[in-house]
Amino acid sequence: MFLGGVSLRVLEKSEIDAFRVDGVAHIKKAVSRELVQEILKSVDRLINEPGRFGGSMTAPHDPGMFFQDRYLYTTHHEFRRYADTCGLAAIAAVATGSKKIRLYYDHVFVKDPGTQESFVWHQDRPYWAVDGTQICSTWLALTDTNANSSALEFVRGSHLWNKTFKPEYPALEGRSPEEVEKALWKGVAQHISSFEEQCPVFEDEPDRYEILNFDVQAGDALMFDFRTVHRSGPNRGNTRRAAISWRWLGDDAFWDPKPGADPIIGENDTILSAGALITDDEAFPPIYTTTNQSKSNPIRSSIIT
Ligand SMILES: O=C(O)CCC(=O)C(=O)O
């Protein structure tokens, strides 16, 4: 159901349970096909004219194309509108038990057929300058996809292990700390070395770890905790795979500006001090707030008001 341009999707109890127990929930038909088509057009424009954090990561003679871009809502008005109207902030509020949801950033991922690049097993937590327990992403499929064509895979329940694995940058494997910092940003090499444990090869231990993957259709979302281990493989399918992830911050999210974290929002970009709850509306815009009226059905009524 769509009202006032905002997508209305009431979360089922089974979806909330999956998010809380498994660390990931498949939200079918999370947004309309019309909105998906609109976002896809913006993604096409972005590929031709990437933002300051965007570009293809595939070498010129390698097959396919792995394009990503992020923090788009600050520079492209339509991406701010997508965050406001997709309805996924309301869903994140219910799933994380938050009254207010703020946007950290948005992130577009495209893999053309034949693309070999993968995202290795990782959690988002060690890459980000925020922390807490009510933080999640909604990865919206803009094309139909499955694990063969690079849909995300997850390690079930890994958000509850109380563990944060070393962040990995496979393309920079074997490079010196100086080279890594030159290619990325200052502080990152030291940040990486401050973690002891690397992500295991989960698929090698099927008795111990359960890997969840989903066949998703354009308009479905995968909502996952920022501590849940996930990855995406090569695109072995015949069609483009495109998605946009919104990173949502709930009530207990706090500013954690560790040196070496993603610099999209740095210490000079926010009034917050380290450890403060996220209250800076400029740097972290509130997208959804629960109203009193919405207690009985937080999604429907608060979006209507
Ligand atoms: O879409 C992808 O390939 C990776 C997405 C991802 O890792 C994320 O949204 O956190």
Image (cartoon, rainbow, N blue to C red):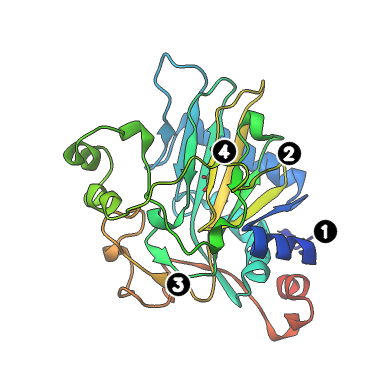
Disc 1 packing (10 Å; few <14; some 14–19; many ≥20): few
Q: Is residue 104 left or right of residue 166?
A: right
Residue 99, position as x, y percentages in the image: 61, 78
Q: Residue 281, which numbered label?
A: 3
Q: Which mark is residue 1?
A: 1
Residue occupied by mark 2: 215
In this rendering, the count of numbered labels is 4
Viewer can see residue 12: no
Answer with mark 4 or mark 1, whichever residue precedes in sequence: 1
Find residue 71 and report its horizontal and vertical position in percent: 45, 51
Left or right: 195, with 283 as reference point: left
Toward the viewer: 209 or 286? 209
Q: What residue lies at 39% left-to-right and 47% top-to-bottom?
A: 198
Distance between the alpha carbons at the discs numbered 3 and 2: 36 Å
The amino acid on which the numbered mark 2 sits, given as a three-letter code, is Asp
Q: Is residue 85 left or right of residue 226?
A: right
**Residue linked to disc 4:** 203
Mark 4 and mark 1: Cα distance apart in space: 39 Å
Q: Which label's residue is closer to the chain start, 3 or 4? A: 4
The 10 Å Cα crowd at callout 4, few under 14, some 14 to 19, many 20 or more, is few
**Label 4 secondary element:** helix
Foreground disc of the pair 3, 4: 4
Q: Earlier in the sequence, mark 4 or mark 2?
A: 4
Considering the image in quadrants, where does the N terminus appear? bottom right
Name the kind of residue labelled 3 in the image: Asp
Task: Kindly identify the amino acid type of the residue bearing the numbered disc 4.
Answer: Glu
Spot the residue most to the front: 207
- Give the mark nearer the N terminus: 3 vs 1: 1
Q: Residue 271, position in %: x, y?
A: 32, 73
Say which amino acid is labelled 1: Met
